[in-house]
Amino acid sequence: MYRIMTADEAADIINDGDVICTNSFLGIENPVELHEAIYRRYKACGRPKHLTMVSSAGFGVWDAEKAAEGYIRDGAVDKLICGHFGAMYSTKMLVLENRFEAYNLPLGCISHAIRAQAGGLPGALSKVGLDIFVDPRISGPGINDISKDDTLVKNVEVDGEEFLYYKLPKITVALIKGTAADTKGNISFDNMFISGDALSICQAVKSNGGKVIVQVDRVVSTHSRPRNTIIPGCFVDAIVMVKPEPRHAAYEALTGNFDIPYEQWPDWNEMLEGRTSTKPSAGNVAADIIGRRASQELNPEDIVNIGVGIPEHVSKYARISGMLDKVTLTVESGGIGGFPASGKVFGSVIGAEAMIDMANQFDLYDNGGLDICFMGGIEVDKEGNVNAHRGPGAFAGVGGFANITAKTKTVVFCLTFNTKGLVVEENDGAVTIKQEGEAPKFVNEVASISFSAKRARVNNQKVLYVTERCVFELADEGLRLIEVYPGVDVERDVLAKLPFKVEIAEYLHY
């Protein structure tokens, strides 16, 4: 039977050695007050300690001094298992200092492993991750030198096929953010942007004899409608009511509480961008060139995923061409239809048609349900492999990238030819490279593999690499140059800048 209590009382029921799973998606739907109550208790009495934290999409609020950052930094946590670390500003740096064990698994594979645990299974099978960094034959999921746990990912064979087997430690505490609790403890998510893995997490915790703690905005006297209940009250142990802080009306566009027509998406997105951007916005000629060219790969009725950064420019040009209204956009958190938001509210959607559980979204992705995706990249090598999760001295995590690119029919990587100082101009359709960047993006061998060219060939995927000066495609023996833009000198601006030789298409398009 659930009890209504304060956040500090809820923190008291967490024990040393617990495995905590939080339902956050990067910076959204984070039960911040619960995390901060844990930190207050840890500072006061040194407990709870030796914690393990699990999160499919990662957690944090883009602030090194808030939410879980404090108790992680001060030593309460021994191990983290996350799909992405981007919203945890302090934690992702401490990972590289060997302060605690940290493991990066594909977001969808963690989500499916949680669902498996909820169903009484020890883990989940997947072909996602084969031949990329997480594969134990490559390097495994450990991020730093002290992360040696070899139980999380294993190579297995079933009926003559190879898979990776993802297994999480038994989850004993759920930290969830919901909208309201009714008189029977049923939790609704009416004003939430996503539901994520909430139900699976709670089911797994209860089957393991653990505690489910839910932070809500309010407790209501009316019974929740059955279809509106995400977490049944019988699964809930503690309810903590925290009155939400006022927020701009623009955020209401992400709740689904009212219809937002296609014509209004840009207006709402503009209002949100000014309040949620994690980076200063500025004009980017190279990104515009890439986004415009990449958008030409869209076809009517495509089911699509568009990544963050340069790929977001695909949406801009798909709208200009009228194609955006003819395709269905999706986002890893469960959104189908509408327009995915970015920045601090990445994972939410303006005008979504549906918001499904995250594990179900990754069923779609893992089984090749996407027609096309547009992803960024840190570097590409001569084989066509892509590193999108780990740069020099920096680490964010692979997130849903590995799942999204694993079986999608057409994969379009959107990246500049080089970076750090690149200056590009475009006049009357002609591209001029005014200044080359200091850091190349095309290398002999990537530092870590997020996307496997070998696996893409096995899956017969169409793979393009769209830059601000040319386009490559994945061929049988590596990259093939298929387009060079007007104004670009193929020898000087492309071939001479590559550290490896590439095949040139018989009919190279200019």
Image: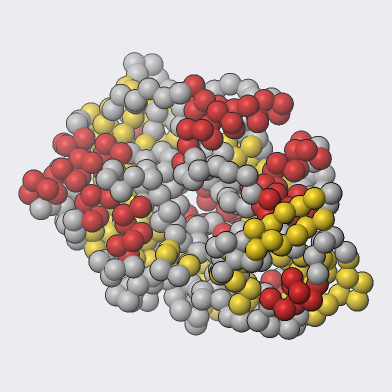
**What x and y, as percent, mark residue 457?**
72, 75
| Residue sticking out furthest to the left | 45
Image quadrant containing the C terminus: bottom right
Nearest the eye: 495 or 44: 495
**What x and y, as percent, mark residue 461?**
74, 67
Image quadrant containing the N terminus: top left
- Left or right: 22 as drawn, with respect to 320: left
Q: Which residue is drawn at 55% across and 73% down?
A: 449
Q: Which residue is drawn at 33% across and 30% down?
A: 216
Q: How many marks?
A: 0
Depicted 369 relative to depicted 139: above or below: above
Nearest the eye: 57 or 205: 57
Q: Look at the image and tell me whether residue 184 can be seen.
A: no
Q: Look at the image and tell me whether residue 139 can be seen.
A: yes
Depicted 375 relative to depicted 182: above or below: below
**What x and y, as percent, mark residue 403?**
58, 60
- Left or right: 125 as drawn, with respect to 468: left
- Left or right: 156 as drawn, with respect to 422: left
Depicted 51 relative to depicted 300: above or below: below
Q: Residue at x 40, y 28 (%)?
A: 179
Q: Residue at x 59, y 32 (%)?
A: 269
Write down the quadrant of residue 32 in the picture: top left
**What x and y, as percent, mark residue 411?**
70, 61
Nearest the eye: 123 or 15: 15
Depicted 162 relative to depicted 184: above or below: below
| Residue sticking out furthest to the front | 434
Q: In the rendered view, how is the structure colored?
A: secondary structure
| Residue sticking out furthest to the top | 221
| Residue sticking out furthest to the right | 507
